Amino acid sequence: MKISIIIPTYNEEEVILTCLESLSKQTIKDFEVIIVDDGSTDLTIQKIKSSSLERYFPLKILSQKHLGAGAGRNLGAKQSKEDILVFVDADMTFDRNFLKMLTKPIISGKTKGTFSKNEYVANWNNIWARCWNINEGWKEKMRHPNNYPDKQKVFRAILRSEFNKVGGFTPGGYNDDWSLSEKLGYESDVATNAIFYHKNPESLKEVFKSAKWVGKRPYKFRILGTIFALIRSSFPTSILVGLFKAVISGQFGFILFKIVYDLGIFIGILNYLFFKKGSK
């Protein structure tokens, strides 16, 4: 089975070449890469075009206006003719055997889609990246909590026939990763030893932007859930939770992190509440 790797990009000029160079070192070579640029205003596309990475794998570059990652992945999938779709982000890098191990359960017929629990924080030395883990309750140096289950709603790889069966993702922002599983009626299975590295936000500006993106979404229990989320991200709550977790973790920069993160969540909620636009 051949593989199409789909990468949505939005102002990723600082990381995209590192991602692609990492893919060029994979132990399996039978794959194509489809870049879907989501309306970047920086040099993302120019950097890709000026590189010589096409000598390692077939490379397609598509463009759309700023519609979000879900819409970008759908566009990339439409342009793919290979058997397996693999979805990665521009700020990821990969172990040499990542593709081999991620797709092995699919190729062997054991499952229709996979994800990996071997997701490490690529920038652990950065204080704000570590604070992100504290805030999420994730395991040290990993991008998931302890006792992470062997089935998840997020697909990292899936048969293209299954993806097409339900029309792909439902674009909308923070929750669009889960929409594929909900439409299919089943979850992805863990692929062992599919090791990759993913950056956490590493500046307060990035923390704010990411939190605002997380906040711009519908909440459970509708208006009651939204009100609860606003209270949880309010300034007094930020101070109390930030101070408590800073003392517990010994990372006192977390107080500032929590204020910035919750401000992003708060503004994101208000944007969604009043303008009814999902995150992009």
Image: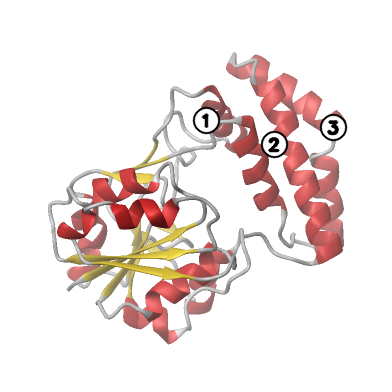
Q: Which element type, helix, strand or loop, lies under badge 3?
A: helix
Identify which amino acid the numbered label 3 is placed on: Phe
Q: Position of residue 220 (x, y in %)?
A: 74, 61
- Asked if 274 appears above or below 238 in the picture, the reply is below
- In primary-sequence order, the first of circles 1 and 3 is 1
Q: Which element type, helix, strand or loop, lies under badge 2?
A: helix
Residue where numbered disc 2 is placed: 261
* Left or right: 206 in relation to 162: right
x 43%, y 27%: residue: 124
* Left or right: 171 in relation to 228: left
> Of residues 110 and 55, which is closer to you in this image?
55
Q: How far apart are labels 2 and 1 at the CA level?
A: 12 Å
Q: Quadrant of the N terminus?
A: bottom left
x 71%, y 22%: residue: 255
Residue where numbered disc 3 is placed: 235
Q: How far apart are labels 1 and 3 at the CA level?
A: 22 Å
Q: How far apart are labels 3 and 2 at the CA level?
A: 11 Å
* Quadrant in the picture for residue 274: bottom right
Q: Position of residue 65 (x, y in %)?
A: 57, 69
Q: Position of residue 155 (x, y in %)?
A: 41, 63
Identify which amino acid the numbered label 1 is placed on: Ala
* Quadrant in the picture for residue 277: bottom right
x 40%, y 43%: residue: 15
Residue 186 in sight here:
no
Q: Quadrant of the C terminus?
A: bottom right
Q: Which element type, helix, strand or loop, lies under badge 1?
A: helix
Residue 77 in sight here:
yes
- Asked if 246 appears above or below 148 in the picture, the reply is above
> Of residues 80 and 164, which is closer to you in this image?
80
- In primary-sequence order, the first of circles 3 and 2 is 3
- Asked if 245 appears above or below 30 in the picture, the reply is above
Residue where numbered disc 1 is placed: 129
